[in-house]
Image (cartoon, helix red, strand yellow):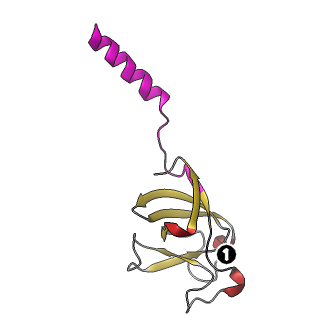
Amino acid sequence: MSRILALATATLVSFAAPQVQAGDCTGWVVGVRPISQYNHARGNGFLAVRTGAGSGYQQIGEVYLGDEISVWDRRGNWYRVQCMSGRCQNPFWGAANPNGWVYGKYLNIGGVCP
């Protein structure tokens, strides 16, 4: 009888607990200089989007102060993001709507995050 009760409880918990889906976590770019101070050579006015979770990876794009992003993965303090709206749709450098890794210190995120 206790086995049946345990199985029933486990089944109910699995239905009640929401499954984390990629992109359920969204947020905004914060803490970088405003776009009026943009200077790619100096690293001002943007947050670099990289091919991997670390500053040693190649930069492939940029997101800017106030841009809305969707979070898809996390490795330590690094988040894999996709541009959803803002200046990142028409960037000064790199591909539009970048999808890659950014340092989490510059994100304000919420929702069901990885």
Q: Where does residue 70 sit, x and y in percent of width and height?
A: 57, 58
Tell me if residue 107 is in the magenta stretch. no
Q: Nearer the viewer, residue 96 or 18?
A: 18
For label 1, the SS is loop
Relative side of 19 to 4, left or right: right
Q: Where does residue 47 sit, x and y in percent of width and height?
A: 56, 76
Q: Where does residue 15 sit, x and y in percent of width and height?
A: 46, 27
Residue placed furthest toward the right: 36
Q: Where does residue 30 sit, x and y in percent of width and height?
A: 62, 69
Residue placed furthest toward the bottom: 41
Q: Nearer the viewer, residue 39 or 33?
A: 33
In which quarter of the view is residue 92 placed?
Answer: bottom right
**Kind of residue indicated by mark 1:** Asn
In which quarter of the view is residue 86 placed?
Answer: bottom right
Residue pictured at 49% horizontal, 45% vertical: 21
Please count the marks in the image.
Answer: 1
Residue pictured at 59% horizontal, 68% vertical: 97
Q: Is residue 41 above or below residue 46?
A: below
* Stretch in magenta: 1-26
In which quarter of the view is residue 98 placed?
Answer: bottom right
Quadrant holding the N terminus: top left
Graded by Cα atoms within 10 Å as few (under 14), some (14 to 19) or many (20 or more), the crowding at tag 1 reads some
Q: Is residue 102 above or below residue 72?
A: below
Residue pictured at 37% horizontal, 23% vertical: 10
Residue pictured at 56% horizontal, 91% vertical: 42
Q: Which residue is mark 1?
A: 90
Q: Is residue 100 above or below residue 12?
A: below
Q: Is residue 86 above or below residue 32?
A: above
Q: Nearer the viewer, residue 26 or 58?
A: 26
Residue placed furthest toward the top: 1
Relative side of 30 to 36, left or right: left
